[in-house]
Amino acid sequence: MMKILAITGALRKDSYNTQLLKAVKELAPQDMEIEIVTLHGIPLYDGDEEDKHGLPASVKALQEKVRQADGIIIATPEYNFSVPGVLKNATDWLSRSGNPFKWKRVGVMGASQGPIGTARSQYHLRQNLVGLEAITMPKPEIFVASADRKFANGELTDEATKKVITSWLAAFKDWVAKS
């Protein structure tokens, strides 16, 4: 069984990116176990606090989940042409005290109401992942545009997007298996 950790870069309860990961989990091959996690509870990074108290329990727990996973999927929203602060903050914390992303296979995706489906934030996230020494899947890419028309009541309803996700998952599974 391949263990995949899926991190949503959004905190909003009805986030399209969290809904996207739920669809990914539902469409995953039977031999792929996907655990979806949010970034709730991760404090703002502060080096002084880290020096005084060490890593927060929420960060240690997420670091361990990253270490135990065979691969990581990150679904990122796009805020002002880039990744949300909460996601960048989490990667900053996760890189502390032993980088669990080092040589880890990571797939990036995102959903937005806009016409380019988080392309700019995914590009910035990929740059950040290079700094974390993660190995980011180059292709295929997945950008879910016009998400407000593809999700209803928390579910992905667009059949074309489901096919893209299924194809992406097959490529991701193959790519992670080669690590």
Image (tube, helix red, strand yellow):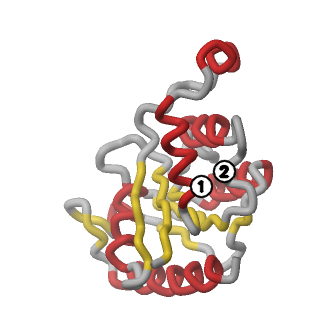
What residue do we see at 40% from left, 41% from top? Answer: 11
Of residues 164 and 33, which is closer to you in this image? Answer: 33
Q: Amino acid at mark 2?
A: Pro
Q: Residues within 10 Å of mark 1 (few under 14, many from 20)?
A: some
- Tags 1 and 2 touching, CB below 8 Å: yes
Residue bearing mark 1: 67
| Image spot of residue 16 (x, y percent) | 38, 56
Q: In screen coordinates, is 115 left or right of 34?
A: right
Q: Quadrant of residue 179?
A: bottom right
Please say if 129 is above or below 146. Answer: above
Q: Is residue 73 above or below residue 101?
A: below
- What is the x, y in percent for residue 131? 79, 49
Give the amino acid at mark 1: Arg
The secondary element bearing badge 2 is classed as loop
Identify which residue, 59 or 92, lies in the foreground.
59
Q: On the image, which quarter does residue 72 sit in? A: bottom right
Position of 175 relative to 46 (above/below) = below
Q: Residue at x 63, y 58 (%)?
A: 122
- Please name the residue that numbered disc 2 is placed on: 100
Mark 1 → mark 2, Cα distance in angstroms: 5 Å
* Residue 116 seen anywhere in this rendered image of the structure: no
